[in-house]
């Protein structure tokens, strides 16, 4: 993002408009690099009008990658022309790759814990199992 573009984006009053013109990745990187990821809305008068799309933007919108903010041509669906067996085979390959990455501790599957925070998936599953056993134990006591 060049300075003139950044300067033009500064007065945008809403996050959605800022992200619309820069893309999620660029917006997050730009704000993080400047220590501005605290959130909130500064003091000032902002337009509540949401329909700020130009005709050019409306025309390009279906082809805009929301992460990069760039206009990209649609790629053909790689699943088109595949049989259900081929799709299942590819899905199992993907599961196998994720399993390998997890076992080698390159990635760590996460889940949302009871407190609403991300926790390792095995801990999340244990918490859920504990809650289920508590509920089933209390159900048995009622009988």
Image (cartoon, helix red, strand yellow):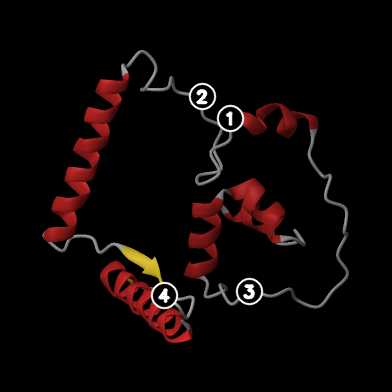
129 above or below 83? Answer: below
- Res 16 → quadrant: bottom right
Within-10-Å neighbours for mark 3: few <14, some 14–19, many 20+: few
Q: Say which residue appears at 25% left-offset and 22% top-offset.
A: 86
Q: Earlier in the sequence, mark 2 or mark 1?
A: 1
* Residue 64 in the image, given as x and y percentages of width and height: 58, 35
Looking at the image, is mark 1 or mark 4 nearer the viewer?
Answer: 4
Residue of label 3: 39
Classify mark 4: helix, strand or loop. Answer: loop
CA–CA distance in space, label 1 to label 3:
28 Å
Q: Say which residue appears at 23% left-offset and 60% top-offset.
A: 107
141 above or below 125? Answer: below
Which numbered tag is attached to residue 113? 4
Horizontally, is 22 left or right of 134 in the view?
right
Classify mark 2: helix, strand or loop. Answer: loop
Horizontally, is 89 left or right of 75 in the view?
left
């Amino acid at each position: 993002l060049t300075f003139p573009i950044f300067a033009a984006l500064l007065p945008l009053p809403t996050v959605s408009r800022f992200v619309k013109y820069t893309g999620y990745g660029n917006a997050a990187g730009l704000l993080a690099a400047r220590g501005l990821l605290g959130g909130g809305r500064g003091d000032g008068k902002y337009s509540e009008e949401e329909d700020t799309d130009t005709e050019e933007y409306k025309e390009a919108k279906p082809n805009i990658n929301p992460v990069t903010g760039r206009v990209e041509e649609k790629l053909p669906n790689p699943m088109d022309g595949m049989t259900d067996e081929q799709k299942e085979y590819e899905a199992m390959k993907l599961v196998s790759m994720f399993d390998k990455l997890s076992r080698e501790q390159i990635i760590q599957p996460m889940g949302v814990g009871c407190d609403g925070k991300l926790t390792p998936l095995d801990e999340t599953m244990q918490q859920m199992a504990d809650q289920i056993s508590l509920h089933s134990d209390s159900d048995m006591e009622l009988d």
